[in-house]
Amino acid sequence: MKANPEVNKDLSFEDFKAEVLNDYHLAVTSRECSLLGRREVLSGKAKFGIFGDGKEVPQLAMAKAFKNGDFRSGYYRDQTFMMAIGKLNIEQFFAGLYANTDLKEEPMSAGRQMGGHFSTQSLDEHGNWKNLLEQKNSSSDISPTAGQMPRLLGLAQASKIYRHVKGIDTTNFSNEGNEVAWGTIGNASTSEGLFFETINAAGVLQVPMVMSVWDDEYGISVHAKHQTTKENISEILKGFQRENDQKGYEILRVIGWDYPALIETYQKASKIAREEHVPVLIHVQELTQPQGHSTSGSHERYKNEERLAWEVERDCNSKLREWIIANGIATDEDLSAVEKTIKKQVRDGKKAAWTAFTQPLKNEKIELVALLEKVAAASSNKVFIEKLKNDLADNSEPIRKDVLSTARKALRYVVNETSVTKNELAAWINSYIAEVQPKYSSHLYSHSDKSALKVQEVKPTYDDSSEEVDARLVIRDNFDAIFSKYPEALIFGEDAGHIGDVNQGLEGMQEKYGELRVSDVGIREATILGQGIGMAMRGLRPIAEIQYLDYILYALQIMSDDLASLHYRTKGRQKAPVIIRTRGHRLEGIWHSGSQMGGVIHLIRGIHVLVPRNMTKAAGFYNTLLEGDEPALIVECLNGYRLKEKMPTNIGEFKTPLGVVETIREGNDITLVSYGSTLRVIEQAAKELQEVGINAEIIDVQSLLPFDLNHDIVKSVAKTNRLMVIDEDVPGGASAYILNEVLNTQNAYKHLDSKPETLTAKAHRPAYGTDGDYFSKPSVEDVFEAVYNVMHESNPTDFPKLR
């Protein structure tokens, strides 16, 4: 080992000693938390544990190079780093393990994520941005391996935007783009495609990203020889190393237990990334995992005695201890005393966290037990209720499930009785659920004043000079207005830049606003989305373009696991209001006309899903969302860009409301509900139905998530008494979702005189060509006959059977 860690050359020797000993204190504290945390899981006090033991020392080095304004995007073993930057203490560590729902006790996620998933708070309690430059920041972790990588790209790219794009208000967000995004990942997870996609994209974009690979040679039980070519990620990435005349990465290797070398390496990486905006890969080798992968099993099952002995010898904490003694910084006795003190501190912190977690639950139990005593005394089923009460009273460590389950079971015993205490119990249950349920369910969407649902509708206006134009010009001119109004807005995607997107909706925008604000990117949908998430988390307003709806499947995992849950899993303390732009519906062929809406709306709850029928409606959605603070997916109609629409006079100002349906044709015989391009088919069918005496009302859903907040569809059904949902998605897809909302949420079944119907595409994707579309998705004739058959069933005299 080198003699001196080059942390600060101006440090006195005494200050240097103090810093080293503080690092050792942090390393031992983190290790003791891991050891005691595992015991808490095995004793049943916590459900699951996954810890950062064996990675303590490199995380200390990383923390020294991490500055205010920087962001981390890591994985679930970075507890030492979080402790070192002052964002995690012992009590908070155990509060996360116990799933304490109090955000003050458990600031990472208020118990919504398992322990080991870390974050900092970017927003205050009202959803307003904090000053991110005055704090060290961590984006909220997720469990899916390598899922942190796409977001990391965007966090780094934000610095590039802030450094080079003029006119943006950088207050709270950036100091001339000097912030670095720090990524961490386990060596096995570098096998994931998301890792390679992000590494490539960061090299192309040249963003200030430092990527640390913690290499302990295993992925759960699977050795690196089964994970990585040559068993060495930095070796196979050598082609990314920058040269004199070629941009790329700076690739560094360091031993994970070499304290001085680690500090030197991380300081060097920070300087390169921060000053030059060059991405850096640090391969941290010879790390260990003393307790194995997690509490689900023991690593003795898959590591032989030789490997286990090797890990003991190279344990980074032990190596740091040896180095401290060898360099005369402290004696063995000094360190033993420190270790003894830390053990007690960790035990005391654990006890304090357990008390803070259990005391509210005990109080809730006591309250219910007292109520059940009264209920039992007044009931003919006293003996049964008393048993429930006594079982709960004897439970010394109840959870809320125990409390509420007991109350609900007790209520069954008095269901046929009339008493004040029965009413008190029913009221207590209702009150308890109302108070407790939000602890587990709140903040799926924004609660702030900037919620997109609070943005008021502004209708497009027209005058005598308003011309019929290709609809693409409406969307293009609206984007022009957006980029002029919002300097922090930018758009990027495949073909979005130079040619102005495949449908010319961005024609001329790159020339006018520059390549950083209107950008072409590679064919890499997951990291296109990741760019959007990361930049939105740092105060920018990105629009991430996925060329076709079918291609969104490449990004769906990130949409579902990261973006959709971000606000929820931080209980409203982080947000990423990225807009995802795509286009779809009714083209031709298996991979250019799919309608995955059923899957999408079920997998991305937490993201608004908007399906405008034309470009004016789509433009209005962009304007609405940019006034709000939530993520959304907008699906433009692929076959609508060349259709004619009137050019509004208030371009950039009109707003389409979220969760509001529109009746585009009034009628009184049947309510037809749909969205997107299919509405044009339905409108034609309605004209033909009118010819045979059937007057159909047509409702455009416009917004799938949220859905018809004013319950206007049920009002239509109350008038027509018949309902049909028409959808180009597969059977049971979005149509089933819409039917459930109308029948079960809006209770439209009360008004039906006929069975509610759905008309969908076939179960397969559309075959190629016009005939492929005709025989795969609902046609005018399909709609006509389906509606006619409903009317035939109710009135066969006026509507005799067709066929």
Image (cartoon, helix red, strand yellow):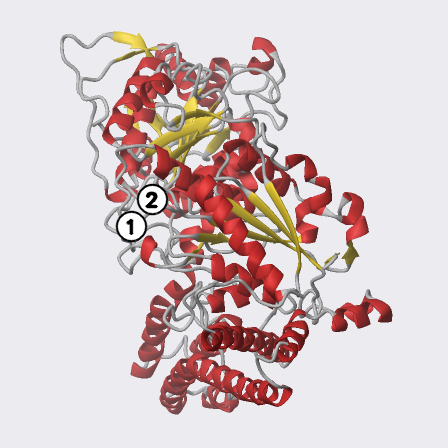
Tell me the number on the disc at residue 661.
none
Q: Give the labeled residue for mark 2.
A: 539
Q: Amino acid at mark 2?
A: Gly
Residue 570 in the image: x percent, y percent? 42, 58
Location of residue 218 (image quadrant): bottom right
Q: Residue at x 61, y 41 (%)?
A: 194
Residue 91 in the image: x percent, y percent? 46, 77
The reply to whether callout 2 and callout 1 are in contact (CB within 8 Å) is: yes
**In front: mark 2 or mark 1?**
1
Q: Between residues 565 and 11, which one lies in front from this camera angle?
A: 11
Instruction: Give how far apart the Cα atoms at labels 2 and 1 are.
Output: 8 Å
Tell me the number on the disc at residue 172.
1
**Considering only order in the chain, which callout, 1 or 2, is on the residue closer to the N terminus?**
1
Image position of 801 with respect to 409: above or below: above
Residue 406 in the image: x percent, y percent? 47, 79
Question: For this view, does 395 lie left or right of residue 379?
Answer: right
Image position of 783 with respect to 736: above or below: above
Pick the quarter of the image with the N terminus: bottom right
Q: Residues within 10 Å of mark 1 (few under 14, many from 20)?
A: some
